[in-house]
Amino acid sequence: MAIHLEEFQELVDELPSGAQDVLRASWNEAARAFSSRGLDNFLKGAVALHQLGRGEELSLFGIKEPAIFGT
């Protein structure tokens, strides 16, 4: 069963537009690697990095390197 990014739209909306673009581009790979719960944790982690207020680069790092979330 495919897990669609739209199912997590509330979390995606919290990310800056550049991070959303990278997320969309890498979603298929992430959806193959993680369970639904893992994807939820992955996105919540990216949002948490963004909310630290250290710029978009930190959330981009979280999206590009999901292993930092331990999922």
Image (cartoon, helix red, strand yellow):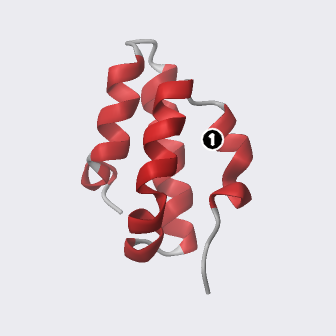
- Residue at coordinates 46% horizontally, 66% vertically from top-left? 28
Residue 3 horizontal/vertical position (percent): 61, 72
Of the pair 37 and 32, the residue shown nearer to us: 32
- Residue at coordinates 48% horizontally, 27% vertically from top-left? 18
Residue 63 horizontal/vertical position (percent): 37, 44
Q: Disc 1 designates what residue?
A: 12
User: Which corner quadrant holds the N terminus?
Assistant: bottom right
Of the pair 21 and 71, the residue shown nearer to us: 21
Considering the numbered disc 1 on the image, is that residue within a helix, a strand or a loop?
helix
Asked if residue 54 lies left or right of residue 27, the reply is: left
Q: Is residue 4 above or below residue 70?
A: below
The residue most toward the bottom is 1
Asked if residue 23 lies left or right of residue 15, the reply is: left
- Residue at coordinates 52% horizontally, 49% vertically from top-left? 24
Q: Say which quarter of the image contains residue 59.
A: top left
Q: Is residue 9 above or below residue 18?
A: below
Q: Exactly how many numbered labels are in the figure?
A: 1
Q: Is residue 68 above or below residue 70?
A: above
Using a 10 Å C-alpha cutoff, classify the residue at mark 1 as few (fewer than 14 neighbours), some (14 to 19) or many (20 or more).
many
**Three-letter amino acid code at disc 1?**
Val
Q: Say which quarter of the image contains residue 7.
A: bottom right
Residue 34 horizontal/vertical position (percent): 43, 71
- Residue at coordinates 34% horizontally, 51% vertically from top-left? 69
User: Which corner quadrant holds the C terminus?
Assistant: bottom left
Of the pair 43 and 32, the residue shown nearer to us: 32
Asked if residue 17 lies left or right of residue 58, the reply is: right
Residue 29 horizontal/vertical position (percent): 38, 66
